[in-house]
Every structure is written in C-alpha cells, then in structure tokens.
Amino acid sequence: ASYGGSTYMLSLGRTARLDGIRDAAEYIVVADTTTGDDGTARIRSFASIITTDDDDALKRVAVERDLVYVVPSRGYEVRARRVTMVGALELSSMPLPSPTAEESGRALLDAVRSLGGVKQAFLKLIPAKKREQMDQLRNRVRLACKLSSDDESSLWPPLFAALDVY
C-alpha cells in the first residue's frame, strides 16, 4: 500500500518514511521512529528545519570531505564519494572516480578489522568442512615448525601468521 509521503536518510544510514505528508521540508530532525511488520521505518515525531536561499545556516557550518568505503553486498567493492555534512546529517553526496591503490588498501584493511580481523573475515567465507581442513593443516604446519627449530616463529609461514595476529 502507498500512503504518499517522503523518505528521509537518517544519520546512521537508515531510511525512514514520513507517511501522509507530501511536501515536507527538505531537512528534518527526527525524534522518534517505529518499524512496522514490513520492515519499513516510519517517522512518528519530527521537526522541520527551515532554510532560505539568502541565509542558509546549514551550508555555513557544513563540512565537505571525501570518503573511501567498501560495499559488502558488492563483494567488498571499494568506492569513493564526496559528501557535504553537518555533523551526521548528509546534505549532499556525489560519486568520485576510483580511489587510489593506497586509499583502497586502507578501506579494505578497515573492513577486515571491522569483521574481526583476517582470521574472522577469511573464515566467514569458508564452509565448515573446509575450515576444519584448514585448521588441521595449520596444526600440522605449527607442529612441523616446532619440531624443526627452537624459534618456531621464524619458520611460521606469513599466511598462517596473518591468521594468528588479527
């Protein structure tokens, strides 16, 4: 069912619908939302922020910055965009060309850390049976390193070390 209204982007990145009001202000402060059985967030309490062309207070305090981020639903594709924000309120956004290799690397490293590190990020992608086989291999290699040298860390392959460190 369609009730008319407007959809807003909230500060935490979620959208919410304001039902029954077609010509609401461009910016609002949302005080209360609820989520219906359909999973749609609806705005229950809000206040409009009125802006004028001559005296736009929001644009005077706005900050413009470039963001490099990953999109998990697209296989952790790295993207960049320029956003204009006041606090957490995003006033505008526009895509940028592909980020540099260094920027992409930082974004991917941040994504891996947010998933709990290399081990957790890697293990989430592997089926349980393969994970068990990988653990068995790691244990065998660890034992071989221990039996081969006094300094186990010098023989421990970097791939396995990465799984242990993060």
Image (cartoon, rainbow, N blue to C red):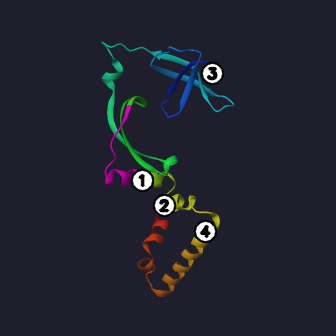
Q: Residue at x 30, y 22 (%)?
A: 60
Q: What is the three-letter code of the residue carrying label 3?
A: Ser
Whole-angstrom CA distance, mark 3 to mark 1, is 39 Å
Whole-angstrom CA distance, mark 2 to mark 3, is 44 Å
User: In the rendered image, which quarter contains the N terminus?
Assistant: top right
Residue 83: image x %, image y %?
36, 34
Tag 1 secondary structure: helix
Q: Residue at x 60, y 72 (%)?
A: 133
Image depth: mark 3 or mark 1 in front: 3
Q: Which mark is residue 118?
A: 2
Residue 96 shown in magenta: yes
Tag 3 secondary structure: loop
Residue with the mark numbered 3: 2
Whole-angstrom CA distance, mark 1 to mark 2, is 11 Å
Circle 2 residues within 10 Å: few <14, some 14–19, many ≥20? some
Residue 79: image x %, image y %?
39, 45
Mark 3 vs mark 4: which is more N-terminal? 3
Q: Are marks 3 and 1 in contact (CB under 8 Å)?
A: no
Q: Residue at x 31, y 14 (%)?
A: 55
Give 158 or 68, whichever is nearer the viewer: 68
All told, the count of numbered labels is 4
Q: What is the three-letter code of the residue carrying label 2?
A: Val
